[in-house]
Amino acid sequence: MQERVPPLLISILCVGIAILYVPILVLIGYSFNASALVSVWGGFSTSWYGQLLHNDQILDAAWLSLKIGVVVSTGSVILGTLAAIALVRFKVFRTRLLLTGMVNAPLVMPEIITGITQLLLFVSMLHLFGWPHRGFTTIVIAHIAFCTAYVTITVQSRLQSADRSLEEAAMDLGSGPVRAFVDTTLPGIAPALASSWLLSFTLSLDDLVISSFVSGPGASTLPMVIFSKVKLGVSPDVNALACLIICAVGVCVLLAGYLMRRSEHRRVLDAQMAEH
Amino acid sequence: MNFTVDWLKRHSKWLIILPPLVYLLVFFLIPFAFALKISLADTAVRVPPFTDILSVSPDSHIHLTLNLGNFKYLFTDEVYGLSYLYSIKTAFFSTVICLALGYPMAYAIARTSKSTQSILLLLIILPFWTSFLLRVYALEGIIRESGLLNTALLWLGVIHQPLQIMRTTFAVYLGIIYSYLPFMVLPLFATLEKMDHSLLEAAGDLGSPPWRAFIDITVPLSMPGVIAGSMLVFIPAIGEFVIPTLLGGPDNLMIGRVLWDEFFGNRDWPVASAVAIAFLVLLVGPIAIYQHYNTKQLEA
């Protein structure tokens, strides 16, 4: 289907993409502005980036966010993959509907509601069991819940299109079901796992609302620090910090996209090989 | 011994199902029960700041004290009702504008060649994953009084005084559309791409003009995408907190902001829980619609 796309559609597409990108490009421009006044161009400078390295509050928050991100993405890839296997391989089981619902709901649930309800749970748990204390632990637990949803959906679609014949062959040759899965299907979906790890990492790194609710005193993640600074007005070092985070997220997403494409490519190649 | 092995074999799938199921149950679903419980409690000066609804009296009877006052309060203080309505109105119009802008975008992307398509998709997906906070902050850099837009317009002589865009309703709409546009385009693209184009050709061969074929064939076939995209914009937009806080003025009282203030400002947890529960009840309908169309699309 290669007909010409009407010029009107092309222009709307360009406007839409411009709306998405102009603010980010302007932000990147500001971050290299030597002048602290946003309306004046004072020449090219990287001084705002240098200042970030001397800001302990920002460095602490960045370190906390990175630690949380690594634990969260690892945890949610494990849970999300299990959920995806359950939904794709076991067609009928009790609680299937429940699991499907809980996997899809976090994608649309307003964060503010998830955040409040989780905080209330943590407070009640602390009251009853003396655990968990609000901070690193509670942020990790809360983030894993919504990242698991994203992982499940990514891995689920990949697993649905995976060819099961190799796995069946391995089982015919005497492998147990777990061994057969690990030897044949797992390498095929590994890129999808890596890409959902990266996507969970960016989701966790970006989250403001849920973290603000479930965190306790002394544990401020990077978005929380940025939010409190932004509320007071624009500051040039936030421009630099925002650019760094956008770049980090961009790299993660590009890498994740690349991994997904490569796995898709390999699947197509395998299918072609099988036909010959 | 044999019995144990048999039992394990029959139930081994639960080893896979249970971890995610239990985790989401405990940390996603059960929290709503706690919110419900606390919304029926009373405020108290202690930690945590609310009373227990269950208590054991000295003669070891269990007493259940339910306090519906928080919900009644939602109806007596008009702030809540007004902010619900205002949030729904804002989310609704933002969704309509997103759809009007996103549909032609998705349609155009679906009609380009495969190689252009992957680049365009990437351009839409990148902002999808970038946080609202940073993107809203970036938008602020343009529409601020001393921002790029005003500087440019002043310099061009189009205006003589900077436009007041920040802290207006317009800024809130702009922020929501800017932030949620990718959530509309991606599901729309997914359905438009899968569409069978021989149907359109057939309609053309039978003498139907292109606009007629579009309305009769493309629009109905893309309905699942329209609904999924609209819900992905509408539902989170109602609860939006960052955008009205950073871009809106005091008039733009959305429910997310009221909740946040109730929690962090007034520290009235029972009332905040009641607001959240009432909000959730209003969302059940849209979420059910979304789930319904989403499962249909996954099975297709």
Image (cartoon, coloured by chain):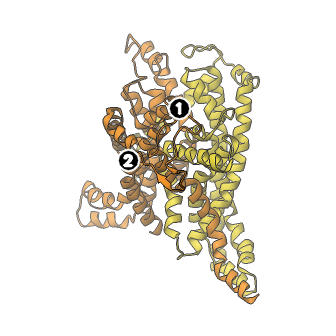
x 49%, y 48%: residue: B53
Q: Is residue A20 visible?
A: yes
| Circles 2 and 1 on the same subunit | yes
Residue B139 is situated, as x and y percent measured from the top left of the image, at: 50, 29
Could you tell me the amino acid type at mark 2?
A: Pro
Q: Specify the quadrant that holds the N terminus of chain A.
A: bottom left
Instruction: Answer left or right for A51 relative to B79.
Output: right
Disc 1 packing (10 Å; few <14; some 14–19; many ≥20): few
Residue A219 is situated, as x and y percent measured from the top left of the image, at: 68, 35
- The chain containing the residue under callout 1 comes to B
Q: Which mark is residue B264?
A: 1
x 69%, y 80%: residue: B8
Disc 2 secondary structure class:
helix
- Check the image and name the residue furthest to the front: B59
Q: Quadrant of residue A265?
A: bottom right
Q: Is residue B227 above or below residue B264?
A: below
Q: Colour of chain A?
A: yellow
